[in-house]
Image (cartoon, grey):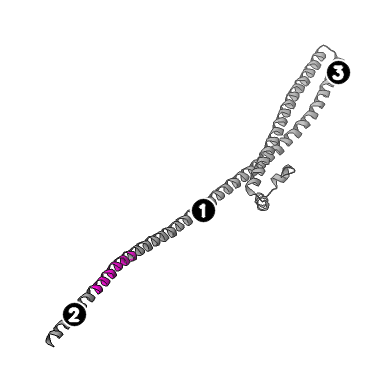
Amino acid sequence: MGIFSRLSDIVNSNINVLLDRAEDPKKMIRLIIQEMEETLIEVRSSTARVIADKKTVVRKMDRMREEAKQWESKASLALSKDREDLARAALLEKQAVEEQLSGVADELSAIDEHLVQLEDEVVQLQGKLNDAKAKQKALSMREQTITNRMQVKRQVRRDSLDQVFAKFEHFDRRMDRLEGELEAMDMGSESSLADEIDQLAHNDKINAELDRLKRSMADKES
C-alpha cells in the first residue's frame, strides 16, 4: 500500500511532518520519492493519451468542416442546375454535419480543460518531487556530517587513549630503570658488606697479635 491514496494527498502533503513521524526517515523519503515518481509517470501517461485524443478530435473536426463545405458546394451546383430540391437536401446534410461539428467542438473544449488540469497536476507533482529530492539530499548531507563528526570523535578518543597508554608505558619504563638502579645499588652493597666482614676478621687477627705481643713484653719485664 502506498503512502498516498490519491493525487491530492501528494499535493497537500507535508513532507517534514511525514519524516518526523517516521521511524526511519531515510527509508520514508525514499518511498515518498518513489511514489511521487510513479504518480508523475501515470499523470504524464494520461496527459499523453489526452493529447492523442485531442489530435484525433481535431482531425475529425477538420474532416467535418471539409464535409460541410462539400455539401455547400453541392447545394450551389444543384441550384445552378435549377434543382432546388437537391440544393435543399444538400443544405440539410450540411446542417446535420455542422450540428455534429458543434458537439465535437464541445468535446474538444472538455479535452482542453482536462489538459490544463493535467498540466497543472504535473507542475504541482514535479514541484513536490523536487522538494522531496531536496529533502533527501539534506538528510543525506546531515547523515554524512554526523558520521564524519563521530569518526572525528572516535579518532580523538583513540588519540587520547594512545597518549594515556604512552604515559603508562613511559612510567613502566621509568620504574624498570629505577628498579634496575636499585638492584645495582644492592649488588654493590653486598660486595661492600662482604669486604667489611672480611675486614673485621682481619682486625680480629691483628688484635690477637697485639695482645700476644703485650703479654710477651709483660713477661719479660717481670
Q: Image height check: is 143 above or below 39?
A: below
Task: Residue under label 3, please give it.
Answer: 89
Q: Nearer the viewer, residue 176 or 163?
A: 176
Task: Residue under label 1, please give it.
Answer: 149
In which quadrant of the rendered view does residue 209 lie? bottom left
Image position of 95 (left or right of 175): right
Q: Secondary structure at mark 3?
A: helix
Cβ–Cβ under 8 Å for marks 1 and 2 = no
Q: Amino acid at mark 2?
A: Arg
Q: Secondary structure at mark 2?
A: helix
Disc 3 versus disc 1: nearer the observer: 1
Q: Nearer the viewer, residue 56 or 173?
A: 173
Q: CA distance from mark 3 to mark 2?
A: 182 Å
Quadrant assignment for the N terminus: top right
Task: Residue under label 2, please give it.
Answer: 212
Image position of 76 (left or right of 178): right
In which quadrant of the rendered view does residue 213 lie? bottom left
Q: Amino acid at mark 3?
A: Ala
Residue under the image location 56 percent in, 49 percent down: 143
Residue that extends furthest to the left in the rendered view of this protein: 221
Q: CA distance from mark 1 to mark 2?
A: 94 Å
Magenta region, residue range: 182-201
Question: Which of marks 1 and 3 precedes in the sequence?
Answer: 3
**Does 184 appear in magenta?**
yes
Residue that extends furthest to the bottom in the rendered view of this protein: 222
